[in-house]
């Protein structure tokens, strides 16, 4: 997407976090926009040494036990999942629930894609490929969120939402056919992205994210990770547009593709 009307030149690219070789090389329009940009913009710095240290610190429990927080039944399922995956429960027991969810999410992605090489699928994610290009070209990087803001959102999930998400991760690992909503279509994401079919992502998400029986926690998830963050990121993009410059912005595709409640609609209103 191209943004006009400010003092800056800005292109927005929707990213997916997994990919395949047949998505690359980027098309001419994407390559030209990357070459023309002076500054590359991402959601958040999660890869620098300082960021990874901060994440590890925030992930660790400061009191109580994971079993007491989750309850015996869900804790038993987490233990079963870890035995199946060969993960030590000693390492899991010291984590906060949101960190356990994030840890298991890598394995659920593998289950949903039907691949044993999830590391390669993640390395072929769009943002990773853009970052590799920008680093090679010596491009400046800026971020739309601080790491603390992103971690606050994850850690701020209600206990009910954390339990729902963790249960979902366990269900998919123990039974890959249990994947629901957008997650169930992960295997199709590379083809959708390659073909520029943003509507497929949007339609699939909007038609399924309010899981029957769990509408309240699903709405909380959407409000926390989509609605609020889209508004904040659009404000920061507006600041860049006013400042001037040439920007290539890479953010998660769902922040751009939804017909309402997207970064694009915020920028159009501005």
Image (tube, grey):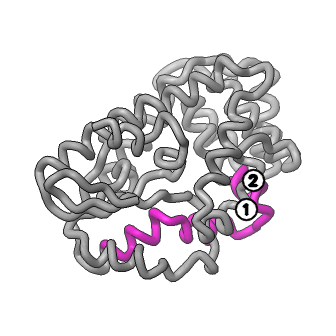
Q: Residue at x 77, y 37 (%)?
A: 79
Q: Is residue 145 above or below residue 25?
A: above
**Prevalent SS, magenta region:** helix
244 vs 183, nearest the viewer: 244
Name the residue tied to disc 2: 185
Q: Are marks 2 and 1 in contact (CB under 8 Å)?
A: yes
Question: How much space separates mark 2 and mark 1, taking CA atoms?
Answer: 5 Å
Q: Is residue 24 visible?
A: yes
Q: Residue 92's spot in the image, x, y percent?
A: 63, 39
Q: Is residue 110 above or below residue 24?
A: above
Q: Residue at x 41, y 69 (%)?
A: 130
Quadrant position of the N terminus in the picture = bottom left
Q: Is residue 147 visible?
A: no
Label 1 sits on a secondary structure element that is helix
111 is within the stretch colored magenta: yes
Q: Residue at x 40, y 45 (%)?
A: 264
Q: Residue 32's spot in the image, x, y percent?
A: 34, 79
Quadrant position of the C terminus in the picture = top left
Q: Residue at x 76, y 66 (%)?
A: 115
110 vs 96, nearest the viewer: 110
Label 2 sits on a secondary structure element that is helix
Total labels drawn: 2
196 vs 83, nearest the viewer: 196
**In-image side of 87 versus 35 (left or right):** right
Please rate how many residues cluster around mark 2, counting C-alpha atoms within 10 Å: few if below 14, some from 14 to 19, many from 20: some
Q: Residue 220's spot in the image, x, y percent?
A: 57, 22
The magenta-colored residue range is 107-134
72 vs 189, nearest the viewer: 189
Q: Is residue 24 above or below residue 49?
A: below
Name the residue tied to disc 1: 188
Please rate how many residues cluster around mark 1, counting C-alpha atoms within 10 Å: few if below 14, some from 14 to 19, many from 20: few
122 is within the stretch colored magenta: yes
């Amino acid at each position: 997407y191209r943004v006009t009307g400010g003092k800056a030149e800005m292109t927005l690219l929707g990213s997916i976090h997994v990919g395949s070789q047949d998505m690359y090389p980027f098309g001419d329009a994407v390559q030209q926009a990357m070459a023309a940009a002076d500054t590359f913009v991402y959601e958040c710095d999660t890869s620098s040494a300082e960021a990874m240290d901060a994440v590890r610190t925030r992930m660790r429990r400061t009191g109580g036990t994971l079993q007491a927080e989750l309850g015996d039944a869900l804790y038993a399922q987490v233990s079963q999942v870890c035995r199946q995956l060969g993960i030590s429960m000693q390492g899991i027991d010291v984590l906060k629930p949101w960190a356990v969810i994030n840890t298991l999410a890598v394995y659920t992605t593998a289950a949903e894609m039907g691949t044993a090489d999830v590391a390669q699928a993640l390395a072929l994610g769009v943002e990773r490929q853009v970052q590799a290009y920008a680093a090679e070209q010596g491009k400046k990087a800026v971020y739309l969120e601080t790491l603390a803001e992103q971690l606050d959102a994850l850690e701020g999930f209600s206990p009910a939402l954390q339990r729902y998400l963790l249960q979902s991760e366990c269900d998919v690992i123990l039974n890959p056919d249990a994947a629901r909503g957008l997650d169930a279509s992960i295997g199709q994401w590379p083809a959708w992205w390659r073909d520029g079919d943003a509507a497929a992502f949007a339609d699939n998400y909007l038609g399924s994210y309010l899981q029957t029986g769990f509408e309240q926690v699903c709405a909380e998830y959407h409000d926390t990770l989509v609605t609020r963050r889209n508004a904040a990121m659009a404000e920061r993009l507006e600041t860049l547009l006013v400042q001037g410059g040439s920007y290539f912005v890479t953010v998660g595709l769902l922040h751009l593709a939804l017909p309402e409640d997207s970064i694009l609609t915020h920028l159009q209103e501005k």
